[in-house]
Image (spheres, rainbow, N blue to C red):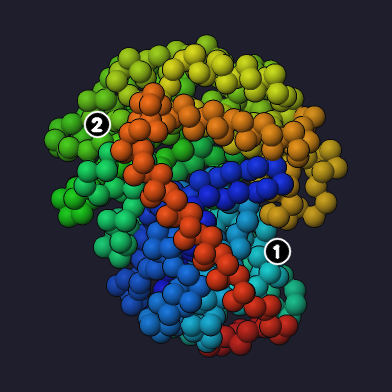
């Protein structure tokens, strides 16, 4: 069969005028799709269209899908870099589905990602063109569905999928998380436009790539969305990781990598061994990762620096000890201070990210947190609104407070930053505007100098960002009229339906 995998074109910035929720869409590889492609390319003719990095309009995406004449189209509502914090508005994914149906009316359409994982019926009702929603980790489920379709066998009993049959939602039992991640092959990077991806905190020399060496998070913070990963920490063997890094370094000339693990140093011994192997291999790579402030120490940080680590992103959330305790974030401000100091002493940049609008939060506490993080003198201080994602304790708190009416993804956007505190949308918008300006100014001064407005590199960045925003605006105006109301009857699939 001919299979086309699609990463939708999301805006460079997701912005809600209701409460000034702002989320940045980085141009990163959809390695979940590339992994699926690697798993099936021996059985099927497979291609990947990354409409996000290519910034394809509705018509451009439709033409590209049509040119492949696919039997199956698989659209992700959110690639793996957004599994933990997906955009609440998945309209671009629905537009991609519309494109797929327009391009190949008889194709079997699959949707993967967080949105259908937590709200399969909502996704299926919003577009009748999706034949099956894949819940949870997508790789094994998508491969099994494709195998069933190829052999013209019954696909409706595959674990981990949901679909509409006779106007009724059918959700099969969940598929368990993959215990042995080594069963996943190295992603098919050759099917991606590798030269177009980048990460602003890492050097631009050579190509950039994401890598994932583990999945899962053993912690239980109230605000983290984990249904795509699970709570059990699962790691790939270092032999496979180094093999993938070797491929990226030698074949694709990758010179900067961001490790997408939720907690890169959760297993300190493993992180140590990985850094030692990177040093031994002699890779000239700058890299970054995400981890917790209580999962690093001076020795490990020094080794990470030697291995090429340039930046570490820490989720610090708030400097208020009571809020940290209530939200299940078992760290203290002193731990944050120590980790940031050790990180800087090792010669690594510290990127701090905190949440605004947690239960018990208020303007004075935000100001206290900002001053606390500012005095630590990190490389970057980012902030975002706390979203009550489905299947999180923050969502349950909102539900208990009577704030949840229907539990849709759209409703979640309106509740960002408003659960369990005295903020109003107006006051929150004012606060976020001020905080965004402060955070941007801090980063610009760190990256481009005190007089950054006169720095040619800053001007170049502004022009590039303005170009991306202009493209987003124009495409939004062009694409939206093409969104047609789904047909009232179920799409007749090319593959026989088994009752």
Identify residue for label 1.
122
Q: Quadrant of the N terminus?
A: bottom left
As drawn, 453 above or below 23: above
Quadrant for the C terminus, please.
bottom right
Q: Is residue 4 left or right of residue 239?
A: right
| Picture residue at 29% right of the left edge, 20% below the top | 347
The residue under the point 37% across, 19% down is 343
Which secondary structure lies at badge 1? helix
Query: Which badge, 2 or 1, comes first in the chain's sequence?
Result: 1
x and y, in percent, of residue 179 in the image: 44, 48
Q: Residues within 10 Å of mark 2 (few under 14, many from 20)?
A: many
With 84 as the anchor, is 445 left or right in this view?
Answer: left
Q: Residue furthest right?
A: 402
For the residue pair 222 and 49, the one nearer the viewer reads as 49
Residue 397 image position (x, y, % from top left)? 77, 37
Image height of 25 relative to 299, above or below: below
Are the residues flagged by discs 2 and 1 in contact, CB closer than 8 Å? Answer: no
SS of the residue at dot 2?
loop
| Residue 409 placement (x, y as % from top left) | 69, 54
Which residue is denoted by mark 2 in the rendering?
308
Q: Is residue 113 visible?
A: yes
- In the image, residue 70 above or below residue 117: below
Residue 53 position by quadrant: bottom left
**Cα distance, mark 2 to mark 1?**
44 Å
Q: Left or right: 479 with respect to 462?
A: right
Q: Residue at x 85, y 42 (%)?
A: 402
């Amino acid at each position: 069969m001919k299979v086309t995998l699609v990463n939708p074109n999301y805006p460079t910035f997701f912005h809600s005028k209701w409460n000034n929720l702002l989320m940045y869409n980085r141009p990163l590889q959809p390695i979940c799709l590339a992994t699926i492609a690697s798993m099936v390319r021996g059985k099927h003719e497979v291609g990947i269209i990354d409409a996000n990095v290519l910034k394809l309009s509705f018509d451009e995406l439709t033409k590209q899908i049509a040119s492949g004449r696919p039997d199956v189209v698989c659209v992700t509502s959110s690639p793996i870099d957004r599994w933990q914090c997906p955009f609440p508005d998945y309209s671009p994914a629905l537009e991609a589905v519309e494109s797929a149906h327009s391009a190949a009316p008889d194709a079997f359409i699959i949707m993967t990602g967080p949105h259908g994982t937590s709200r399969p019926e909502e996704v299926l009702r919003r577009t009748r063109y999706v034949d099956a929603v894949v819940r949870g980790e997508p790789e094994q489920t998508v491969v099994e569905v494709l195998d069933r379709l190829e052999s013209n066998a019954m696909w409706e009993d595959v674990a981990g999928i949901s679909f509409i049959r006779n106007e009724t939602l059918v959700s099969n039992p969940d598929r368990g998380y993959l215990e042995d991640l080594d069963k996943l092959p190295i992603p098919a990077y050759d099917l991606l436009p590798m030269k177009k991806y980048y990460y602003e905190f890492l050097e631009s020399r050579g190509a950039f790539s994401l890598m994932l060496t583990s999945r899962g998070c053993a912690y239980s913070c109230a605000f983290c969305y984990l249904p795509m990963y699970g709570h059990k920490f699962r790691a790939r063997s270092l032999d496979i990781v180094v093999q993938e890094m070797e491929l990226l370094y030698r074949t694709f000339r990758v010179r900067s990598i961001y490790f997408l693990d939720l907690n890169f140093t959760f297993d300190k011994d493993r992180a140590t061994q990985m850094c030692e192997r990177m040093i031994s291999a002699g890779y000239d790579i700058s890299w970054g990762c995400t981890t917790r402030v209580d999962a690093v120490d001076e020795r490990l940080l020094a080794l990470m620096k030697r291995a090429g680590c340039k930046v570490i992103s820490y989720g610090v959330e708030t400097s208020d000890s009571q809020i940290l305790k209530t939200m299940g974030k078992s760290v203290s401000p002193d731990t944050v201070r120590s980790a940031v100091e050790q990180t800087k002493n090792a010669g690594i940049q510290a990127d701090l990210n905190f949440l605004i609008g947690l239960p018990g939060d208020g303007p004075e506490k935000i100001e206290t947190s900002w001053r606390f993080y500012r005095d630590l003198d990190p490389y970057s201080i980012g902030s975002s609104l706390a979203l009550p994602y489905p299947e999180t304790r923050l969502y349950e708190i909102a539900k208990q407070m009577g704030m949840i009416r229907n539990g849709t993804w759209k409703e979640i956007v309106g509740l960002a930053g408003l659960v369990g505190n005295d903020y109003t949308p107006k006051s929150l918008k004012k606060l976020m505007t001020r905080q965004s300006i402060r955070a941007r100014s801090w980063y610009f001064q760190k990256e481009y100098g005190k007089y950054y407005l006169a720095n040619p590199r800053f001007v170049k960045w502004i022009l590039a960002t303005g170009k991306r925003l202009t493209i987003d605006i124009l495409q939004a105006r062009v694409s939206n009229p093409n969104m047609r109301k789904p047909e009232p009857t179920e799409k007749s699939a090319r593959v026989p339906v088994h009752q």
